[in-house]
Image (tube, rainbow, N blue to C red):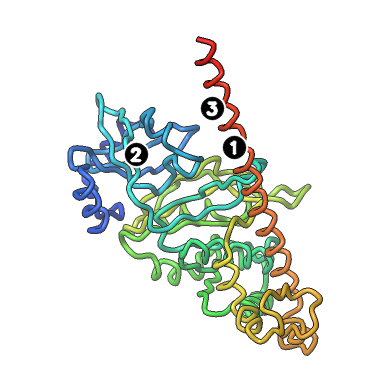
Amino acid sequence: MSIESANQLYIEMTLEELGYNAKLEKFRNENNLKEFEVGRVVSEHKERYIVKTEKGEFEAEITGNLRFSAKSREGFPAVGDWVAMTTHDADFAIIHSILPRFSVISRQDVGKFGEIQIIATNIDYALLVQAADRDFNINRLERYLTICNAAKVSPIIVLTKIDLIDEHRTFEIVEKIKARISNVPIIALSNESQDGYDKIKAIIERGKTYCMLGSSGVGKSTLLNNLSGKSIMRTDAISQSTNKGKHVTSHRELIILENGGILVDNPGMREVGIADSTSGLEITFDMITRLSRNCKFKDCTHTNEIGCAVIEAVEKGELDRTSYENYLKLEREKAYFESSVIERRKKDKGFGKMVKNYKRYINRKK
């Protein structure tokens, strides 16, 4: 869709329908941003952004000052962000400031040492999508839950493709999830027959923002098309040779649904690294958190210590062993990421010191 046709389609949309609220307006007033237009980032393409406003959609870039002041990629706009900008011509804008984020879903940046990649911001609910026929993996669900809990985003588990298995198998999977994950809604549905769609549509509220998290081929694009009421994303069949999904969605994009809900679609994620999420782990593995209060040592690692209440619960069958092992894996991953961040900061500090000394040397030469 061209910018021109998109502008015609969304010209009647208000900021409130995009999720704008009184807190954001208060910040805008208190920080002298009234002179700027306000819009929401709906997609990002290599530091070029599409921003949706009441007037329509604009291609946008950030100012040099915003680029210079950003200490990391987290300082750049992301899908879901509210930004203050100036518009130029009919469809181009310059982003001057990012308004405060109330939630940030992030992961370890793949292949980048000690860095965080933002998946989406200002998210109310996350749809954790897994396919019942092949993709089902509770360990991965706990990983997604940890990311959501760290971001203070409410998770909803969505089990797709139940038409490819029988009712008994669907019941077994749901019960397995409930045995390890409590107090999280579970919706089982079929993208083909649309069984279960009444339940997922019932939870989607007008003006609230939802983000889909899941691997490739689990049915996210089909789910989006069905919820939006029109064909937005191309869908592909699962590869018969590898039984793996294909990356249909190539970038993150924020889309307004038929009932006024707002949904962020994501490319399938094969790697979802945990990044600095102590609170997320504590909430996801709340039973381990509670048991650890009874450990003999306050700094117990729950691996081999005498008097560890967590190990004792596993040995007695009171705590699921697989969940316990997944917890230890995620703890190690978190600790490694935190050590990577410290090491990267030391390198950055050392490089900064070297540049400063070089400048002093050049000035003395002059």
Name the residue rendered at 65%, 66% in the picture. 132
| Badge 1 or badge 2: first in the primary sequence | 2
| Disc marking residue 356 | 3
| Disc marking residue 250 | none
Quadrant in the picture for residue 278: bottom right
Left or right? Give the position of 41 relative to 330: left
Q: Which quadrant would the N terminus be assigned to in this image?
A: top left
Do labels 1 and 2 touch, CB within 8 Å?
A: no
Name the residue rendered at 20%, 43% in the picture. 32
Say above or below: 77 vs 155: above
Q: Residues within 10 Å of mark 3 (few under 14, many from 20)?
A: few
Name the residue rendered at 78%, 47% in the picture. 241
Of residues 15 and 342, the one nearer the viewer is: 342
Q: Residues within 10 Å of mark 1 (few under 14, many from 20)?
A: few
Say above or below: 176 vs 112: below
Name the residue that disc number 1 marks.
348
In the picture as drawn, the residue positioned furthest to the front comes out as 364
State the count of labels.
3
Say above or below: 268 vs 77: below
Hey, what amino acid is under mark 1?
Asp
Name the residue that disc number 2 marks.
51
